[in-house]
Image (cartoon, rainbow, N blue to C red):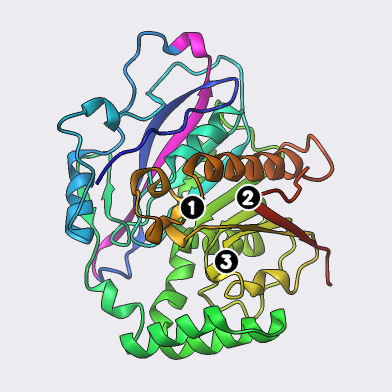
Amino acid sequence: MKIMKIPMPTGEYAVGTFTYTVKDDREDVMAPGTMRSVAARVYYPVLKESVQGLKKTVALSENMIKGFKSAFLVAPNFKDNPEANLSECYTDAERIPGKKFPLIMFNHGYTSYREGNSFLCIDMASHGYVVISVAHSREGLCTEFDDGSYLFYDKSITKKQYQPMLGGIITMYKLMKARGSDEELAQKFDDAQNKYSTFLRDRLPEWVKDNEAALRYAKENLTDLIDFEKGVGVSGHSMGGNTAYALCARNEDFVCGINLDGAYFGDYTNDIQTKPFMQVSCNDNEYVVTRVYTRHTKPVYKVLFRDMKHIGFADAKHMIPMKSMVGKLDPDLMHANLCKCHLEFFDAYLKRLKDTPELNSNDVVTVSVYEPDL
């Protein structure tokens, strides 16, 4: 897998990073009889002069590369260019004394990994946010814990995602082509998931619990770094974006959120979105995610990217040159616009530096706003 030039963070800060593990948080329903542990990576702002002479953090460990090969039969190859396997952040870099920053939680997509959206997380940290990226063990390529243990993706999950597989895939593909009102399309999606995707539907509460465990740790141990006064923001890709929506709807700690092209697997029968929210989508999934535009008491932003595919919203956009998989849009244009969406949204609704995000349609994105409907 060829590695393209990765984007540099654009904020005033350099970025430090460290990991933590919440051990044995609860019974793991993915592996009955075992306890669930939650691994998280923290990205945080540091002074640029404090990282001079420090070595950058390794992007993908040997275990993570093995996870890629196991799941997809291909993986990044750094043997000829080990410098390409370095992130634009620094392990345990010195924190800024007396300085706290607002928190954004981030969740990867299904079969992705904790660092799967590192370019976005690092850029957000460089602009004065702490970002905690939460891993979901057995459902990501490889989850690494601080005691040295690790878990690879549970391949048995693949057959569980749609049952029966062929009927589920065909039905979900048809939903991408379906048309109707937002309410009608949301109901069609619910009918489909209740028939074919009960496994994914029922995973949502557990992903929510993973975030709540990671957040409890942060509240107990990272108060010198994180400013919790204005609440917590949340973003995520795919299933992680779906989780962001659920956290905003169900947990008062979370005050705003962004979903990167995630379908709304889960039982949302009784949920009303009471927080500002943003739905980022590609054309393929524009009509699959309409639940977000219904039953809300705060503005919902729709940002539609042109010439994009689903996995292109992750680091894969810069790592996989196959346009059929990540879309035709230039990776740097995608990244710049995705970061702008996040900064404008969280600057408005988390930092509260402005009343509303300053977002307009351009050659890359089309922006719409759904005002409260309840």
Image height check: is 114 above or below 53? below
- The residue where tag 3 is placed is 283
Q: Nearer the viewer, residue 123 or 327?
A: 327
Res. 53 mark: none
Image height check: is 131 above or below 36? above
Q: Residue at x 45, y 54 (%)?
A: 312
SS label for mark 1? helix
Res. 313 mark: 1
SS label for mark 2? loop
Q: Residue at x 34, y 22 (%)?
A: 56
SS label for mark 3? helix
Mark 2 closeness class: few <14, some 14–19, many ≥20 residues within 10 Å: some
Q: Which residue is drawn at 50% across and 40% down?
A: 120
Q: Nearer the viewer, residue 275 or 115?
A: 115
Q: Which of 61 and 34 is in front in this view?
A: 61
Real-space Cα separation, disc 2 to disc 1, in angstroms: 13 Å
**Labels 2 and 1: the sequence-earlier one:** 1
Is label 1 or label 3 in front? 3
- The residue where tag 2 is placed is 364
Type of the residue with mark 1: Phe
Q: Which residue is drawn at 37% across and 90% down?
A: 167
The residue range painted magenta reads: 33-50
